[in-house]
Image (tube, helix red, strand yellow):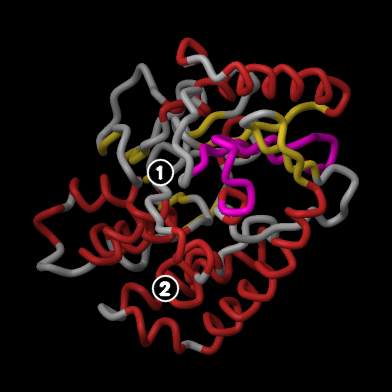
Amino acid sequence: MRIISRPDFDGVVCAVLLKEALGGDLPLRWTQPSDIQNGRFRLLPGDVLANLPLAGDDDVAMWFDHHVSNVSKKNYPGIFRIAPSAAGLVYEFFQGRWNGRFKELVRQADRIDSAQLTLDEILHPQQYPYVLLSMSIATRRSLEDAIYCDHLVSLLRAQDDIEPVMRDGTVRRRCDDAVVANREYERSLRDYTELDGHVSITDFRGLSPAPDGNRFLVYSLFPDAVVNVKLYDEGPYVVVKLGHSILNRGCRVNVGKLLSRYGGGGHRGAGACRLERGHAESQAADIIALLRKNAAESD
């Protein structure tokens, strides 16, 4: 049996809970949704999968997920339900085991993964430990990030209070790096984002590496937009990331279902897909056109 999770804050909290519920000695593996969907990561029958999609007729021991695009026709032990976080579903499933532990950690995973943040939390994450901790997990440095996520799981299992976690040397360095990266990211957003009606389009194609940082910041910089489109290169693909504004909640398009047409997916309000470079220009234009239309029938 292995625990398989996604290297983001929700995935880390899922791993904390599953390790606590099923056994701390279970091996932990980190992977991205596209790696499972494209067959680059092989699931085994005994695996416990959290915050990730299944591909085809994968046979796993347990599955916990909350993404609208990941509905499966097959029933698995665990919970699949649209919810603020996958961690909340793991917490619910094993609810008799916690004795009051991890309640605040799961509450924060719910808030962060469902983007229920205030403007002050967006602009000043360094003043909010859980928000800053979530931003310290980058997702484009696979090996380095896997090691860091393992470290966070160990810390969060051992501590009921967030302050000792934030004082850890590795965490402190990663958080300091995130604060610097966020400042640089703001400049990049201003330089490479244009407003097209109520759609803000951030085009980082041609930049290597593509800028990365506070995913909520663009909503404060372009308050008239109800949705953001971010484009960047990744090997032979162009990645498209979409997100409803959490400050101007007027987008009616179901992002997860829209991107499932292009081999991606996600939540109603946020998601991603990868487009083959030869088709990316026309497909990205189609996606933007649907967002500009902003019709509920795009669900």
User: Quick one: 83 or 58, which is closer to the camera?
Assistant: 83
Q: Is the magenta stretch mostly helix, strand or loop?
A: strand
Mark 2 nearby-residue class (10 Å; few <14, some 14–19, many ≥20): few
| Pointer 1 with pointer 2, Cβ within 8 A | no
The residue indicated by pointer 1 is 49
Residue 45: quarter of image: top left
| Closest to the observer, 160 or 120 | 120
Q: How far apart are marks 1 and 2 (CA)?
A: 29 Å
Q: How would you rate the neighbour count of disc 1 (Cα within 10 Å): few for under 14, some for 14-19, many for 20 or more?
A: many
Residue drawn 75% across and 25% down? 284
Quadrant housing residue 35: top right
Q: Where is residue 64 in the image (x, y as percent from the top left)?
A: 33, 41
In screen coordinates, is 180 left or right of 74? right
Q: Mark 2 points at which residue?
A: 128
18, above or below 246, in the image: below
**Horizontal side of residue 240 vs 66, given as left or right:** right
Residue at 71% in and 37% down: 195
**Residue range (magenta):** 220-245
- Give 39 or 144, whichever is nearer the viewer: 144
Identity, as a three-letter code, of the amino acid under mark 2: Tyr
